[in-house]
Amino acid sequence: MSIRIGDKPYADRIKDGIGNDFMRKAVSSAQGRFRTGRLKAAEELGDWEDWRTLGEEIRHHTMENLDYYLHQLSEQVEKRGGTVFFAQDASEANAYIQEVARKKQAKKVVKSKSMVTEEIGLNKALEESGCEVVESDLGEWILQLDEDPPSHIVTPALHKNKAQIRETFANKKGYTQTDDPFELAAFAREQLREDFLNADIGITGCNFAVAESGTATLVTNEGNARMVSTLPDTQITVMGMERIVPTWEELEVLVSLLTRAAVGQKLTSYITSLTGTRLDNEVDGPEDFHLVIVDNGRSKIIGTEFQSALHCIRCAACINACPVYRHVGGHSYGSIYPGPIGAVLTPLLDGYEDHKELPYASTLCAACTEACPVKIPLHEHLIRHREIIVEQEHMTTKSEEILMKGFAKWASTPAAYQLSTKMARTALSPWTKGGHIEKGPGPLKGWTAERDFPAPAKKSFRKWYQERQKRRED
Amino acid sequence: MVVHNRERFLDQLAERLNRPRRTQVDAPVYSVQPQDRVFHGATQDELVHILEEQCKVIHTDVIKTTSGELADSIRQVMDTYKVNRLVSAGGPRFDSSGLIDSYDDMRRDGYLVHVWEEEKGQENVTFAEKAGAGIVFSDITLAESGTVTLFNDRFNGRSISLLPETFIAIIPKSTLVPRMTQAARLIHEQEQKGVPVSSCVSFISGPSNSADIEMNLIVGVHGPVKAAYIVVDDL
């Protein structure tokens, strides 16, 4: 898997999403819960706008000095017995990790949840070099057994119901119990415990690295990331190059923002800060530690008007606030990063060619921008993407171009505008039934395929207004 | 231990930032500091109350006791959770609080108690995997989030608070601070003094959980299923 998921065209993906009733109900209920949780947590904390300002300032400062902090991080990790690999792209990162696995003669790799390893397609690369890879986050494990991509960056299996999960467990792992979530989770606990104990290598992502001490911090609830970093002798941590803070003081602020914005928790069950290898006198934890820092298109965003997209702390608050995501679900975006941040980030990381529709998967209502705990102006980025797609990339269809040019000319010529508004009602009368149009002609087709279009009013607004003014004067 | 490909990578970043590589950055000054205002000036007793309230949210039992009754409280917790095998962290605090001695009494009464020791190597992990409960001292306790902070080391292996089904934390009242801000600041100040941070700092807030199946909260996934905090009033 890479950043792009599936080969279906955008329109088909959307159709699938809209037609999936269970998913849509699940998403709307999840959005409600996430939103309530976030707002309640913000209110309990108090001064939320100050917190957001602080979050934004920290992210801005860090990005502006990213070369310095990454250097400091790598020095500290080395000092604490770790090896650091800077990877330009997915293939460099994967090749390095394959090489570590080969040297260790690793048979089994156990992973905790990591979006960046999804992005670089690490599982496939490791499987190709003969390793068994086990995802240990409950949601990720379900998806792995079912060979299904994630649809949300915090709760990746949001689109699946418990009956489907029961069936997956039964087919793939011989599960015989009910679809009670507690029983399903207990089964996962029992099955994966063996994997944790037998694994040769543990692989984690990284929520925030701390430059001053060379620490990688993981924000989790299930405890699987602790297993992955406690039991195997070798640990590999993979991080996007922007996932870093200067010191522990900034770490604390961003963790406080992340857990509240993501799930409304004050802190998740586990915030685990790992520095280098275990010490000589320690019994558990890795004796060999590798930190892989991945660029994979991120540096192209640095120094551009989109730089603040790299401020993202992957809380999914924008996804949980988005009315478009609510209706189409995560898979419609065709990217492992869905929702507003996905629509901003995916074209930047993977180009406009395959993702030119994503910036249009937004109503520009700005709910995303308002929800973002580090104040990324998401909807403004989406508008800018649209401008670039039209003006620089020339990716609109010829017919749309002609249509828009015609519209501009027509709308800026008062006589033409007035004439056509007068005629519109008559012109559309063959399609009008009882005040609305159900199957419109030409450009209206796209609209009326999904919903009715109101028939033009008998009287234009200007005309109505003139008459009203006149009545008043009389 | 090596660092691979760094210079090429960072040179490119500096180029994108349109300036030479930075080798010195002054500590930033931020315009706001809301984190210092949370529970500012709260007394230790008030912090205990905040902790207790938060523990209701995170499915964690709180038992209040004194140092003289600590050993009995631990037994009570184990009996309540029907636990017979206990893996305990070791080190100075367990010695000075008399708990190591009290473990002998417990063994005589049929409990299986293992104290984590470097010399026992992998045996520690093997016991922890089979133990019903793991017990540790909290190094710093965060009232707001109901969090115990552990600086894992040779006395306090990571497995103790992770592998057994029940997690027990002894919380000396003096270790309570308002929130993560104070713990992070302490670690930052130590780093600046050249005292390196533990290889693993675990901030633990109650038992493990997940909402990955239809957003239902499931308490107890890979880590402990139950958690109890024993707050010691006079420590």
Image (cartoon, coloured by chain):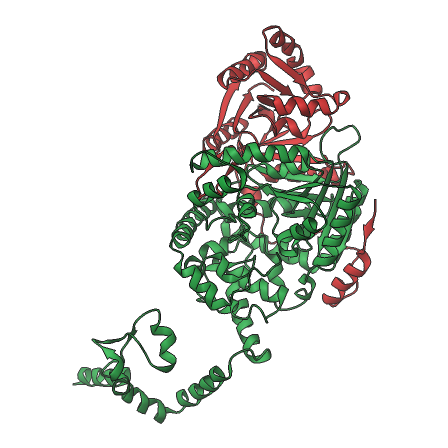
Chain colours: A green, B red
Q: Position of residue A22 (x, y in %)?
A: 39, 52
Q: Quadrant of the N terminus of chain B?
A: top right
Q: Nearer the viewer, residue A372 or A445?
A: A445
Left or right: residue B158 compared with residue A450: right
Q: From this viewpoint, is residue A57 visible?
A: yes
Give the residue at x 56% y 32%: A190
Residue nearer the viewer, A221 or A67 = A221
* Relative side of A151 to B190, left or right: left
Outermost residue, right direction? B1
Identify which residue, B149 or A348, lies in the foreground.
Answer: A348
Estimate the x, y position of residue A420 in percent, counting from the top left: 32, 89
Quadrant location of the C terminus of chain B in the rendered image: top right
User: Where A318 falls versus A141 (above or below)?
Assistant: below
> Is residue B202 shown to the viewer in this render?
no
Farthest left residue in view: A474
Q: Position of residue A247 (x, y in %)?
A: 69, 46
Lateral position of residue A46 relative to residue A81, left or right: left
Q: Is residue A229 above or below residue A47?
A: above
Q: Residue at x 61, y 30 (%)?
A: B162
Q: Position of residue A356 (x, y in %)?
A: 55, 71
Q: How many marks?
A: 0
Write the residue at 40% across / 89% down: A410
Q: Nearer the viewer, residue A40 or B152?
A: B152
Relative to B60, say whether A416 is above or below: below
Q: Residue furthest top?
A: B108
Give the vertical position of A13 relative to A232 (above or below): below
